[in-house]
Image: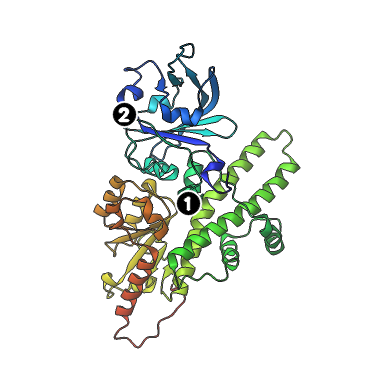
Amino acid sequence: MKAGYLSQFFSGVAAKTLSAVEADPARSHQHEFNGVNGLISVFERAAAKQVFPAKFLYLSDDDDPPVFEDGTVTWYDARHNHPTRSEHRLYFPTTNVSRCWAAGDLLVIGKRPGDSVLVVAAQGGSTIANQVRWLFGVGHAVQLGFFVREDLETEQDRIQFASSLILEQLGIVVETTEETFLDRILEKFGRRFPPTSDFSAFARTTLPDLTARDDPDRALMAWMEREEILFRTLEKHLIADRLRAGFADDVDGFLQYSLSVQNRRKSRVGLALENHLEVVFQQNRIRYTRNAATEGKARPDFLFPGGREYRDPAMDPRLLTMLGVKSTCKDRWRQVLSEAARIPGKHLLTLEAAISRDQTNQMRSNGLTLVIPRGLHETYTQGQRTELLDLGTFVALVRDKDLGLHVDSSEPRPLAPRV
């Protein structure tokens, strides 16, 4: 087993598209999947009934929390007394999760170390279903029969930033830490969480040979992954200190502390992404304003060439560019549409992998162009890729607009952020 690969979390994975009979309890009361050769390769042949603890999970693109329930699955050979034939089956109980299933949903059964099982169903045609397919490398060819993967140590299966975000939606926290950096972190910041801007700057110093001038896409993803590793290293250390101090009988205090950990993780990722993007623009000599006021209370994440130009009524709107930034989208991409009303065509940078075709079609019909770091383009279909921008292309776009703005101007071009 290699560290940093899916094999850390799963010994085997089987995926299929649910049929109407399997998904509709009114049409089937068996609650079983036939133990075809694929499932046998995951669970091995059963000498007797084997009961595995299982976590059931249903995912959709709704903002509602995932539906989950703990239970068991049973693996057995219905013909174990037959001299020549076997008929393996995987039994599952009725749960709140199975009640959500519908024909066409993606089903993934993963056997985990310690002989537990994760049963994940994802809404058919959804972004999260695409992401689960990409995560496990089962592609779009999954039909009614099981597709099985046992080798989970290929390059596709390496746990990077985007895949760790998907794993967390499955309830699996990827603890990527690097203890060799801990002393440096504590020496600089002490035993506390520093402001995100300071921590982002520190993360970049640990990659001194990396510059966004050469490759903005590679730099952004490398900085994000390094900051995630460093943050989890510090977090693990500080949480251990807090747990050693104990909570006595303060249950509410423990719950509040747990919630603060989760909220810090979520808010920090978005801020870190904006921090590193700001340096990408600075290193590429791009003029911009971060969080400039436009109409009402709207404050777009980035305006190019700046807020002053945006507020100038004589400024040609075609020379203005607006970029929203969200580490993940779901339906939150619509928030970008109401920002910077003078700019009809919006841009949104996200680290979301494998957004569904239906959703990218909605974005395009609303005048929104996605900016996706180049390394994540492979998670999209070939047709979708023709509509995406990578970060390097976006940088060139705003630079060309700014050069056009100044072609007849003697005003020097500032390199720092604008107001």
Residue under numbered circle 1: 155
| Label located before the other in sequence (2 or 1) | 2
Which mark, residue 293? none
x 47%, y 70%: residue: 212
**Position above or below: 212 against 261:** below
Q: Is residue 385 above or below residue 65?
A: below
Residue that label 2 marks: 103
What percent of the width, then of the height, locates residue 350? 41, 55
Residue nearest the viewer, comparing 31 with 271: 31
| Displayed quadrant of residue 404 | bottom left
Secondary structure under tag 1 reads helix
Q: CA distance from mark 2 to mark 1?
A: 32 Å
In this view, the residue farthest toward the left is: 365
Residue sitting at the far top: 81
Residue situated in front as seen by the camera: 287 or 31: 31
Dot 2 amino acid type: Ala
- Residue 364 or 166: which is nearer the viewer? 166
Q: Residue at x 34, y 17 (%)?
A: 28
Q: Name the residue at the bottom extreme.
A: 410
Percent of width and height locating residue 68: 48, 30
Q: Residue 143: x and y, percent?
A: 32, 34
Q: Is residue 128 left or right of residue 3?
A: left
31 horizontally vs 53: left or right: left
Vertical relation: 259 (above or below) 94: below
Q: Amino acid at mark 1?
A: Glu
Classify mark 2: residues with Cα within 10 Å, few (<14), some (14-19) or many (20+).
some
> Horizontal placement of 88 versus 182: left or right?
left
